[in-house]
Image (tube, rainbow, N blue to C red):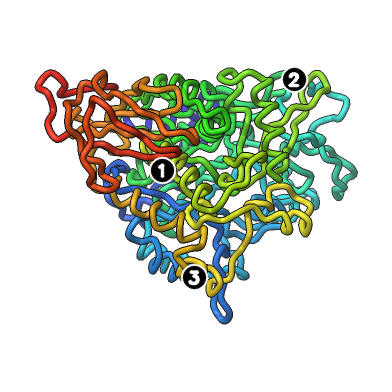
Amino acid sequence: MSTHDTFWNHLAFLYGNERTAQLLSRLQTLADKYATRLRTRQQSPTFSQRDAILITYGDMVQADGETPLATLADFLRHTVANGINTVHLLPFYPYTSDDGFSVVDYTAVNPTLGNWSDIHQLGHHFRLMFDAVINHISAHSDWFQKFLADDPAYQDYFTVVDPAVDLTAVFRPRALPLLTEVKTAVGSKHVWTTFSADQIDLNYANPDVLLAVLDVLLFYIEQGAALIRLDAIGFMWKEIGTSCIHLPKAHRAIQLIRSVLDAVAPHVALVTETNVPHRDNIAYFGNGHNEAQMVYNFSLPPLTLHAFHSSNATVLSQWASTLDLPSDRTTFFNFLASHDGIGLMPARGILPQATLTAIAQRVEALGGLVSYKNNPDGSQSPYELNINYLDALGDPAAAEDDDLRARRFLAAQAIMLALRGVPGIYFHSLFGSRGWREGVAQTGHNRTINRQKLPRRQLEAELANPNSLRAKVLRPYLHLLRLRSNEAAFHPNGRQTIHTLHPAVFAVERRDPDGNYPILCLQNVSNQSCTLSLAACRLGTQFTNLLDAAPANSTSFTLPAYGIAWLKPQAIPRSSTSAGS
């Protein structure tokens, strides 16, 4: 199908045939403008085992006399460039709340962080991923202020609803009111606010909004974005009487965005952020060619946490064995921690509610916090665990030292690194941070516990001390990343087979996309050593552990408590030249 026909079909589905011709002309004009300005490489985005993404705020590392973005770029270049090749900058735009996710101006850099030159400088050393916070915008933005002033051009930029309308069917991710009353030049109105009173949802039923947002996304690409994260995108389309999440027109709007990028900037990948049950989440792959190239693997963090809490990888292994990709143009964005908490919704339907409740209680015993959401029946459910992932793995009944904490944490990270996909690593995970309860006391927000900003000099001093927790995490973590980058078996579209060798061991066999170069990755989720037979994997009898070059055999292999072994067969039987899907 031609680009013209693809645009037409999407616009007609979203806005009706009678408006399509005029909208298509406007869309084509926008696409042509950026096609001329970008002069981009005409190729699809490609990912390999060399890709690893660091998730960070622009001011995570700070130094006197420098813009935080400049400090971050220099710090990362000197500490992690041999393991990280992509940086996901969390929203760096002017904002009014939610640590950047209530954007005032989509096209400006927050002057407290730096400027576009700082962004470009970071892009000289790392591929860049930008956040597109396009479900909602700040109440202090120019768009919403013009709405309040009754500017005719902006009256349909936001969704106005009579508070008497029945909205009980709407899915609520927060224990907050859905509608917010605002004072406009012509009186009071109630506007749709999915997340907070300061985050006003955009109205994509108005095509002017979609075209304006497309202009923003193409501007990001012009500024160097190679990946674009679509924040909370499942909520973007509203229809009264429905759940207002994952609606067909939401998917179709993303497909239109994808088709525009395919035409103008085909090297750019879309990454959808939908913190929902796994089945709904992977629907954003579309047919494998027409929607997101990557989706966040949201079920991985809570299921990995459950495996370590229970010292049993069975549920994690069973779930991982179901993971599949619709095409070789898609892959998972694998992660365990981010600037947000650990979402529990993606584990619903996999873990029973009683287990999720027990996990939440254990997190509270470990000093973490739990956030709740409203249910249609008026009840509340825990939806997010606010705790540093290293802390979340702990045992509240045990006295633990940093050696144990680091070893257990790295075993969890190794699971994420071994799975098919591209790893996304939060700054505080890579640098071995603990939770920041003082920050929660300062801000009153649970998520602050995992968002501490660090003085560069202090951070570097801790990293230089080999006995510090930070050093005990960062050095072996970078070692794992370097090993991973050198092995074709870890290609994001390579083959994957889950083996059942021991209840406490997560075992995944990886191969390159052609089924060659196998590596058997073993991670012990318990504090007891495990002795295994590897014969059932049919990968030969002799192996080399990539982590330390030590030999291993298939008859009897012992994995220590929270141990990691990435085993490369020394010879592959002819009958085992391919595996997995």
What amino acid is at disc 2?
Answer: Ala
Q: Earlier in the sequence, mark 1 or mark 2?
A: 2
In the image, what residue occupies the spot 57% across and 81% down? 65
* Discs 3/1, front: 3
Q: Nearer the viewer, residue 369 or 565?
A: 565
Q: Nearer the viewer, residue 349 or 155?
A: 349
Q: Position of residue 464 (x, y in %)?
A: 45, 69
Q: Residue furthest left?
A: 574
* Discs 2/3, front: 3
In the image, what residue occupies the spot 76% across and 43% down? 196
Identify residue for label 2.
Answer: 169
User: What's the mark number on residue 436?
Assistant: none
Tag 3 and tag 1, C-beta contact below 8 Å: no
Q: Residues within 10 Å of mark 2 (few under 14, many from 20)?
A: few
Above or below residue 261? Residue 103 is below
Q: Position of residue 213 (x, y in %)?
A: 55, 46
Q: Earlier in the sequence, mark 3 or mark 1?
A: 1
Q: Quadrant of residue 291?
A: top left
Tell me the distance, in whole angstroms, between the alpha carbons under discs 1 and 2. 36 Å
In the image, what residue occupies the spot 52% across and 68% down? 462
Q: Residue furthest bottom?
A: 65
Q: Quadrant of residue 286?
A: top left
Identify residue for label 1.
Answer: 423
Identify residue for label 3.
Answer: 460
Q: Position of residue 200 (x, y in %)?
A: 72, 44
- Helix, strand or loop under label 1: strand
Q: Quadrant of residue 249?
A: top right
Above or below residue 19? Residue 447 is below
Q: Does residue 378 appear to the left or right of 437 in the view shown?
A: right
Tell me the distance, in whole angstroms, between the alpha carbons under discs 2 and 3. 51 Å
Q: Nearer the viewer, residue 285 or 457?
A: 457
